[in-house]
Amino acid sequence: MPERFREDDFHAFIRSHASALGPHVLQGPGDDLAVMDFHGHALLMGVDQVIEGVHFLPGTAPEAIGRKAVTRNISDVAAMACRPVATLASCVLPMDVSPAFAQRLVDAVRRTAQQFNAPLVGGDTALHRSQGPLTLSVTVLAEPLSPTRPPVLRSTAKADDRLFVTGLLGGSLRPDGSGRHLDFEPRVDEAEALATTLGESLHAMMDLSDGLAQDAARMALASGLQAVIDAAALPCSPGCGWRNAMGDGEDYELLLAVGGGRAVPSHVGRGRTPTRAIGLMRAMPKPDAPRVICMLNDIEIAVEHLGRFNDGQVDGA
Ligand SMILES: [Mg+2]
């Protein structure tokens, strides 16, 4: 058993029982959402939670908690260039929570879900019997943008694809718990614009939740490749450097692999969100090579230790 049982371990466990998944599972665990064949139509689904002390600090407003619980799921829908359809929510509340706080929390979930055209269609609540953190889990259902535009996976990047990111990276989660991680805009609109503009040249995409170092490594691993990132090209948030961009996490921006020399618009979506070329995918130079390397002044820097899983910060994005 691993020292800590993480999301990737859970997914590997499910895949180890792949024969139980049946013929309707088109894409099992390991991508941003699972994909099911539902009577001839693709239905996507995912689940993600926020936990007090892990994804937000005590004292955070219930409106911000409810919003983040929904938006981090909507970000996974954007990651696959799909459209959200519906949400469900399940929360475990502290034993001493006030009804007014709980009401504000679930209303934030409902309003945020509605904002992204994914109405809250059901849910459940429970109270801790002893001291325990607020935990709010949201399930999202989604559909492809059209029958001719299937979900964009993270496992289909190709050698020589160029890598791009949207927005700015780093500094999303400040030490006091505040920051962009509470009020980021999921890149649904940007993902649709990219999928429409790039068509089949958009080989792979995912959202960035655990830091570029970790997430680019995941895309590279899933695609059987190595990601090479140019540190000087990273679009860093104000006050941040390339290490923050690689390792801070909670950015909820898009990472995309684009093939065929296809031009990528410098700004996408209604919000004119910037895109930036940051590197490329290439064949693994040797079987035990790292899945992601970072180049700075022609020097190869190991970055696999960066990211939310490995730097001692809070876990679980
Ligand atoms: Mg994701």
Image (cartoon, rainbow, N blue to C red):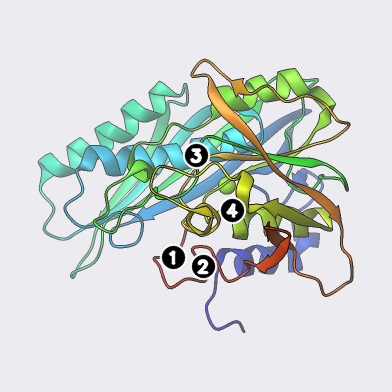
Q: Earlier in the sequence, mark 1 or mark 2?
A: 2
Q: Is residue 275 above or below residue 137?
A: above
Mark-to-mark CA distance, 2 and 4:
12 Å
Residue type marked 3? Leu
Q: Is residue 124 left or right of residue 116?
A: left
Of 310 and 36, the residue lying toward us: 310
Say if mark 3 contacts mark 1, CB within 8 Å. no
Callout 1 touching callout 2 (CB < 8 Å) = yes
Q: Which residue is mark 3?
A: 168
Residue drawn at x 73%, y 18% is 197
> Do we see residue 257 in this rendering?
yes
Q: CA distance from mark 4 to mark 3?
A: 11 Å
Identify the image quadrant of residue 101. Answer: top left
Q: The disc labelled 2 sits on which kind of residue?
A: Phe
Residue 65 in percent (x, y) is at 29, 44
For marks 3 and 1, the one nearer the N-term is 3
Residues tagged 4 and 3 counted as in contact (Cβ below 8 A): no
18 is higher (above) or lower (below) than 195: below
Ligand 1 under 8 Å from disc 1 Cβ:
no
| Residue placed under numbered mark 4 in the picture | 212
How dense is the environment of label 4, judged by Cα within 10 Å: few (below 14), some, or many (20 and up)?
many
Between disc 2 and disc 3, the foreground one is 3
